Amino acid sequence: MTESQTPNGTAPRLHGRVAIVTGAGSGMGRAIATALAREGADLGLVGRTASSLAETARLVEETGRAALVVPADVGVAADVRRAAGAIVERFSRIDVLVNNAGTNTSRRLFANTDVDDWDQVIATNLTGVFLCTRAVLPFMRQQRDGVIVNISSLSARGASIKAGVAYSASKFGVTPLTQMVNIEEWRNNIRATAILPGDTVTPILERRPVPPSPEARAPMLKAEDIAAAVVFVATLPPHVLIEDLAIRPTNRES
């Protein structure tokens, strides 16, 4: 495979583009980053753990694309500004932002969620989306082009005991953030999509009060399924907007 071909022999649809993926060190983030690289994008990889990001960078570079590792906490404004600046300094542009970083707490009910649990989940899942979006918008406005993909959850359509109070609230909040980008920025050719996955096999499952068994995980979505959806959204023609995209396993029990 050459840089001018994807694994199926077609021309890469994101050649010359630069994408940022948050939470890129594992799970959905790693799958999304490598999928975007296979379509020709160079990657800015953001997350808390440098060693995990380095492994994702290795996978990106195996596709022939460049990767910049930027350890940062998306819930900290100074970290986010530094990360965006470093990526623009390296690649000179930002075309796609994937707000993927997410977390949950094992204590999920009003009866046992404390303020620290709440603050941690909201900081990553909601404030992080706001901060990262705010950081990239000036560069996208200068380019008059940009795609923002927010990895939300089916919990944004209805709270559940399984997701918990903090996680459900954070994902509900991602919906108006996505909508506001489209309301404010369409004249600058910037659009945003929220992808709402159902149960997906990623490391966050280990944070459930009772992690699901291998049998329960078998019919769930895979990280690569979400990555394919991100590539689909990122490669749509500029006049096309999908504001939210729900994805669930066909098995209704999963």
Image (cartoon, helix red, strand yellow):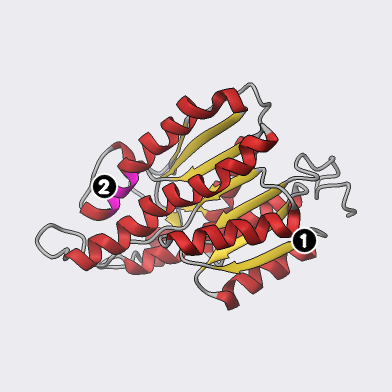
Q: How many marks?
A: 2
**Residue 24 visible to an observer of this rendering:** no
Q: Residue furthest left?
A: 111
Percent coordinates x, y for residue 26 in the rendering: 54, 66
For disc 1, the marked residue is 66
| Amino acid bearing label 1 | Ala
Return the disc, 1 or 2, that comes first in the chain's sequence.
Answer: 1
Residue 143 as seen in the image, left or right of residue 206: right
Residue 21 in sight from this viewpoint: yes
Q: Are marks 1 and 2 in contact (CB under 8 Å)?
A: no
For the point 66% across and 33% down, the residue is 145
Q: Secondary structure beneath disc 1?
A: loop
194 vs 94, nearest the viewer: 94
Residue found at x 58% / y 74%: 52
Tell me where residue 128 appears, x and y as whole percent: 42, 54
Q: In this orientation, which residue lies closer to the viewer: 198 or 26?
A: 26
Q: From the viewer's perspective, tell me whether residue 123 is left or right of residue 138.
A: left
Q: What span is colored magenta in the figure?
A: 167-171
- State the CA–CA distance, disc 1 to disc 2: 36 Å
Residue 44 is one of the magenta-drawn residues: no
Predominant secondary structure, magenta span: helix
Secondary structure, mark 2, is helix
Q: Residue 147, which numbered label?
A: none
Q: Position of residue 203 (x, y in %)?
A: 44, 66
Residue beneath the point at 26% across and 47% down: 169
Inspect the image, locate mark 2, and give the three-letter code of the amino acid beneath it. Answer: Ala
The residue to which callout 2 is attached is: 169
